[in-house]
Structure formats: C-alpha cells, structure tokens
Amino acid sequence: MHSSLELKREVDAIQIPSGDSIKLPLGMKVIITQSLGGTYTVATDFGLARIQAKDADALGIDAEADKKADTSTSSNVPTDISDLEGQVWNQLKNVYDPEIPVNIVDLGLVYDCKVEADAEGKNKATVKMTLTAPGCGMGPTIAADAQSRIMTIEEMDDAAVELVWDPPWNQGMISIEGKMKLGMI
C-alpha cells in the first residue's frame, strides 16, 4: 500500500484538507496511503489528495476488482430500524474520511438516518452528519459521497445529507469497532 508509483494519466483530485479541486499530472509520483470505500488517498510532494474510484486507472488499479463493501457490524447502528434504513446504514459504512481509516458510521459522524415514503410511495433518505472538525474543507465531498452511496440502493428515489454541528463531535462518539481500528482500545 505504501509504495511509490507514477500516475498513468492526468487525473482530477480533491486536495486534503482544503477540499479544493486539483489536477495531478501524468507521471507524478504518488504514494497510496489509504484505499477505502472506493476512494484513494495519495501523498504527493504537495500534500494529500483524494482520487475517486472512477479514476483508479490513473493509479494502475482496476476499480471493479478493488471493490470491497464494508458489511461489518457497528455498535453505532441502531437496532430498531427498517430493512431499507439498514441498507442506508450499510452504504454509509462505505464512506470514509480520507485522512482516517475508519468509516463515517464507526467514527460517530452520522447522527441521524431516516427513510420515509412520500404520498406517491417514493423513498427518501435523510441523513444528518457532522465532521471531526467544523472547518474541514472535505465536508461537502464526504457528504456528496454519502449521498451517492445511498442512491446506489435500488429502492431509493432521493437522498439528502445535511452537515450539522450540534452536538459537536468528540472521540467518545467513535464506536468500539472504530476505536479498535484506531488502536484506542
């Protein structure tokens, strides 16, 4: 995972932690520091950047072969939820902060998740989530990733992901599973 490689083509990326869009040039040397949830965090001479799965070929990776869904359990997922809400939570477990190797559910970033059907029977998921720091420039990117993951559910017609700041996130919100991955217990 931590060996240097050269980009096979120019690629769009997101600068971490600012969230700014950048282009990484063909031939640039990068080191993959994290490959989770279908995205790749790379270290460059200019800092960290996030590359989406659709651009994995720039890293010489077959994105389809590299897909691994997180089907693990989490103490942060409510037990009294519908099957469709369970599918939403499972999709959210495939969304990662590009600097932390723990999904947003186990990090304790997802505060609320509801699925409701409207009068026409169309299903809409509404998620309230936060970030580890209010000034994180990656917030819109992580929220968009969460919304995109939710919309992969066949029965889902719409999804809204809202960033909220109350209550403020703290390390006590990390699940037992997340703390184990981070070496906190």
Image: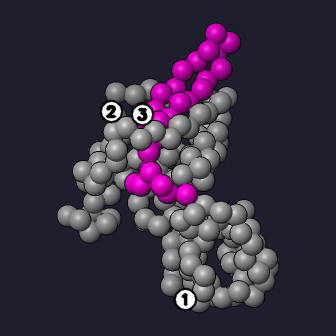
| Residue 67 visible in the shown view | no
Left or right: 155 in relation to 137: right
Query: Contact (CB < 8 A) between labels 2 and 1?
Result: no
Q: Nearer the viewer, mark 1 or mark 3?
A: 3
Judging by the rendered image, the residue that carries numbered circle 1 is: 3
Give the label on residue 79, or none: 2
**Chain part drawn in magenta:** 111-137
Residue 136 within the magenta-colored segment of the rendering:
yes
Give the label on residue 101, or none: none
Give the label on residue 112, or none: 3
Q: Residue at x 34, y 27 (%)?
A: 80
Give, as a three-letter code, the residue at label 2: Thr
Give, as a three-letter code, the residue at label 1: Ser
Q: Quadrant of residue 155?
A: top right
- Residue furthest to the left in view is 185
Left or right: 91 in relation to 81: right
Q: Nearer the viewer, residue 135 or 13?
A: 135
Give the quarter of the figure containing the C terminus: bottom left
Residue 115 drawn above or below residue 24: above
Q: Nearer the viewer, mark 2 or mark 1?
A: 1
Percent x, y for residue 25? 76, 81
Work out whether mark 2 precedes mark 1 in sequence or the reverse, and give the earlier one: 1
